Image: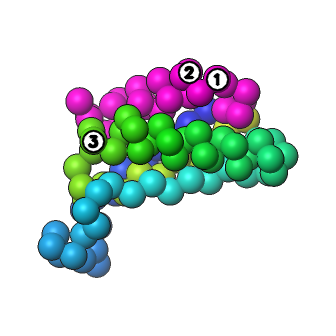
Amino acid sequence: MIYLARRDACPGRPAAAALPAAPRLGLTVSRRVAGAVLRNRLKRRLRECFRLTLRPLLPRDTDLVVIARRGAADLPSAALCAELTAAVKACCGAT
């Protein structure tokens, strides 16, 4: 349901001093997932999970891209956050 890509060392990226002070999150939720109201609610829930749980775990030069798939909008917030956290830990090695 959730796919992650970590991009922290790409050619053309600014020097470490010019990087933002915190990791960044990019979200994609297509119309196939749900209607506009549920898509926006899902994005708010994912952003909140990132802010509270994942941002402290990731290095500051991390750009995290999440692509929500069908069924993600049906998950309760706790399960959604647990699944996202587990996927980030598996993908990026965050502790």
Which portion, as a residue range, is magenta?
71-95
Give the quadrant of residue 32.
Answer: top right
Instruction: Answer few, some or many: residues within 10 Å of disc 2's Cα (few below 14, many 20 plus, some between 14 and 19).
Output: few
Residue beneath the point at 41% across and 30% down: 85
Q: What secondary structure characterizes most of the magenta part?
A: helix
The amino acid type, in three-letter code, at marker 3 is Pro
The amino acid type, in three-letter code, at marker 1 is Pro
Describe residue 80's horizontal placement relative to residue 59 as left or right: right
Indicate which disc, 1 or 3, sits on the residue closer to the N terminus: 3
Instruction: Answer few, some or many: residues within 10 Å of disc 1's Cα (few below 14, many 20 plus, some between 14 and 19).
Output: few
Magenta-colored stretch includes residue 88: yes
Report which residue position mark 3 lands on.
56
Does the rendering let one see residue 83? Answer: no
Q: Secondary structure at mark 1?
A: loop
Where 13 sits versus 74, above or below?
below
Q: Which circle marks residue 76 in the picture?
A: 1
Residue beneath the point at 45% across and 54% down: 25
Q: Position of residue 30 (x, y in %)?
A: 73, 51
Q: Whole-Å distance between the Cαs marked 1 and 3?
A: 22 Å
Q: Position of residue 17 (x, y in %)?
A: 15, 73
Report which residue position mark 2 lands on.
79
Residue beneath the point at 77% across and 42% down: 38
Describe residue 12's horizontal placement relative to residue 70 as left or right: left
Whether pointer 2 and pointer 3 mark residues with C-beta atoms closer than 8 Å, the reply is: no
Whether pointer 1 and pointer 2 mark residues with C-beta atoms closer than 8 Å, the reply is: yes
